[in-house]
Amino acid sequence: MQPEPKKSLVGEEYEVEVGPVAHGGHCIARTEAGQVLFVRHALPGERVIARVTDGEEGARFLRTDAVEILTPSKDRVEAPCPFSGPGRCGGCDWQHAAPGAQRRLKASVITEQLARLAGLTPEESGWDGTVEPAPGDKVAKGEVPAWRTRVQYAVDAEGRPGLRKHRSHDIEPVTHCMIAAPGVSELGIEQRSWPQIATVEAIAATGSHDRQVILTPRPGGRLPIVELDKPVSVLRIDEKDGGVHRVHGRPFVRERAAGRTWRVGNGGFWQVHPKAADLLVEAVMQGLMPKKGDMALDLYCGVGLFAGALAERVGDKGAVLGIESGKRAVEDARHNLQDLDRVRIEHGKVDQILPRTGITDVDLIVLDPPRAGAGKKTVQHLASLTPRRIAYVACDPAALARDLDYFREAGYSPRRMRAFDLFPMTHHVECVAILEKAAKGA
């Protein structure tokens, strides 16, 4: 006999006092009955009416939106974006918080993740407890930084471009994304119709005038003639096999960072914030302090950003090995660094390729893993290579904290850490942790 389905609580409302921020762009609250709520569009200390958007009776927690603010926080501002708010565009999490408050919220999340998953305080991590704004991101009251150099628009059944709602396939049509970089906005994607298209990705390279549009047609849909406001290259994604086909123009964009030009094709990773690449290279190199003759690893190396910076610093007598799983990114990395004989780029997964290299010791390691982190097995292998220093670049504070705990078990501890707000208005945050061999007994 099948158990009776549990009653959905979607649409139910609760008056609650909002508690601390949690990882993921929401805050925690509890009903009078003790039910845990994840509350979006709220701030710590507020009293709100929270409406359930996902959850059923007996659930460990319910997802909710703050649909009415009874007692606002001093950090609350009117959301600058007209498409923000409960049930609207899900691209931003903190439009309703002042910029400084957003960074404090992110710092609170990092602090909580370090404590819960790694047993570390900010002081033990070598972190001052602050999240640094990117250069140029301080704007006038009521404005937002226009930082996003890559935006993927979803297209509704009427051909209108928009952005997905939070945890939904539903589309919120938009006429202007406020966090899109000027180069993206200038393409005019939002001002035209895209019949028979499922998604439109717009890219505006940093340091060059390269602009690119990547179209994914609906099944059976025909590719429209693309006439935009600026010269662009156009790619098409095959809806059946995911293959990339060039329609016209270059199949890549050229980014400029760390004193070099970088070819980045579709599938190759590049930081979305225009200042991110230079900022992260500076933080990593300051932390690692490479010396002439060093042997260094750049793991999850993408198109070779850190490998190139390391190669310039280790000199002709040094060597750099980069490992990357994305085939197109490897092709780009080899192209980008072809003038540096001391750099070798290998294609494959780090945990599979690194053991095959026969490398038993290195001087420096930089790793920039995907959101899930590196994992215990890889961390243990890296520690066994006895590097002088390790730079861990992380886009997820939970994964960073887990891996820092693994590193500590393997004999390495964080000495310095910095956090950067490279994703204003969202809950995302970037961290760079520098690890060294822990003193015996530490």
Image (tube, rainbow, N blue to C red):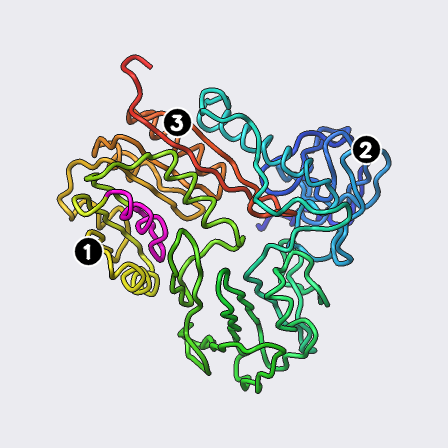
Q: Mark 1 and mark 3: span between their CA atoms?
A: 32 Å
Query: Is residue 122 placed above or below 242 in the rendered structure?
Result: above
Q: Position of residue 105 (x, y in %)?
A: 64, 34
Say whether residue 36 is left or right of residue 396. right
Q: Are marks 2 and 3 in contact (CB under 8 Å)?
A: no
Of residues 386 and 289, the one nearer the viewer is: 289
| Residue at screen point 48% across, 65% down | 208
Instruction: Tell me where residue 332 sits by quadrant.
Output: bottom left
- The numbered disc on residue 47 is 2
Amino acid at circle 2: Arg
Say whether residue 204 is left or right of residue 303. right
Of residues 5 and 71, the one nearer the viewer is: 71
Q: Which residues are magenta?
A: 298-314
State the residue position of label 1. Answer: 341
On-image quarter of the C terminus: top left
| Residue at screen point 31% across, 51% down | 308
Residue 300 covered by magenta stretch: yes
Q: Please tell me which of labels 2 and 3 falls first in the chain.
A: 2
Q: Position of residue 263 (x, y in %)?
A: 38, 65
State the residue position of label 3. Answer: 414
